[in-house]
Image (spheres, rainbow, N blue to C red):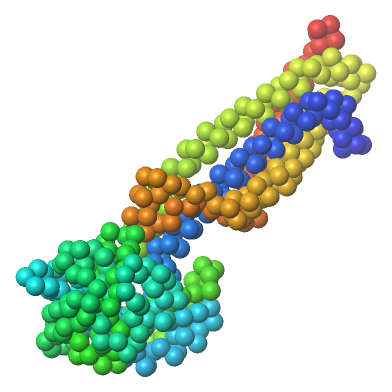
Amino acid sequence: MLFKMAWRNIWRNRRRTFITAASILFAVLFASFMDSLQRGAWDNMINNVVNYYFGYVQVHQDGYWEEQSIDKAFLLADSLEQVGAVEGVEAVLPRLESFALAAAGETTSGVLVAGILPNVENKMTDLENRLVEGEYLTESDEAVLVASGVADKLGLALGDTLVLISQGYRGVNAAGKYPIKGIAKFGSPDLNKQMVYLPLPAAQYFYGAPGLATSLALKLSGQDDIKPVVAALRTQLDTSAYEVMDWEELLPDLVQARELDTAGNVIVYFILYMIIAFGIFGTILMMSKEREYEFGVLISIGLQRWQLALSVWVEVILLGVLGALSGILLSMPIVYYFKVNPIRFGGEMASSLEKFGFEPIFPATFDMQIFMTQALYVFILTAVLALYPIFKIRKLQPVQAMRG
């Protein structure tokens, strides 16, 4: 009975109903769009950084990540097949990494030498498409691919010889001369200043580490596979010999930056919800004021105050449901559009993002949980604000209300 009366009441004044429902609709729309855009931007940035070099999951010998010494290399044949068989792992990128002194003429510079399997490495990091000069490496090459920053600092050009001097596995001397087959340019300044790539067999020979690797970077099917893959590897591998780390453990600074940005957005959301609350409360206040005469008459003819208050509260709740559902339905195609057609930046903003290895695009995340969560928040806010008419009815003087 009360529900039926409430439903009829909300359609007696269609204009008021549409205004109230519209304020709730736009509240859900704005909140969902902001949340989707923020999450999408961070997911895209993390994907750029992680797939730029590190991978979502890495496997090392225990203690390697703290020391990063070539002496903590492990036999590749013992682990490569076992890791690659885990469900969710699309590719395993073995690497032999260590620092070296690069020289050309009288100029020297410290560099990070990464021994890679070129075809496998390209599946995740898209290294071949970063070439600005020359050709990509093959596994049988006795040549190097250098970052443009290294080439500029040492005054190197395509075809020049790069001399590498280092300390190899278990203290052996490492020295070699390699022609430059390609020059790559990275968005990240750090990578651009220090990266030198060798085919893995050539790097193993250079460092006196045949059959060894310092890390396995994993390309996964998606971010949802991170936890299952890490759990599976920690079960299958000897954790006293190997450590399995996900990207959050590898890049704690990036995790902190995301958490800081999320915390900062709490203030933005608070302001947004305050604006939303005032908008919704304004329409509820208007409705309560316009219907004082009606409330006075109903109480005078014998309707219990609690019944009237409950009926009005149900009215606002129905409006909240209508507005929240409409907000979800309207926000879904808008968010999907910005997922397919992300916001693209240009000029100085794009240059700044590219310097840190980020694509200058902000896609939205299409996740039903976002829509449902924001709709729930706005619905709860509406339900709380709907308590105002109840207090109004409790204190209402029927005679004065009918006179006014």
Q: Out of 373 and 37, give the one closest to the viewer.
A: 37
Q: Position of residue 126 (x, y in %)?
A: 42, 71
The answer to whether residue 240 of the structure is visible from this angle is no
Q: Out of 85 and 238, give the one closest to the viewer.
A: 85
Callout count: 0
Image quarter of the N terminus: top right
Whether residue 222 sits left or right of residue 24 in the image: it is left
Q: Position of residue 68 (x, y in %)?
A: 24, 75
The outermost residue toward the left is 106
On the image, which quarter does residue 151 sit in?
Answer: bottom left
Q: Position of residue 205 (x, y in %)?
A: 22, 90
On the image, which quarter does residue 92 sit in?
Answer: bottom left
Q: Is residue 360 above or below residue 206?
A: above
Whether residue 28 sits left or right of residue 56 in the image: it is right
Q: Is residue 359 above or below residue 83?
A: above
The answer to whether residue 229 of the structure is visible from this angle is yes
Residue drawn 35% across and 85% down?
138
Residue drawn 58% across and 30% down?
275
Q: Position of residue 54 (x, y in %)?
A: 37, 70
Residue drawn 11% across and 87% down?
173
Residue drawn 34% across and 59% down?
187
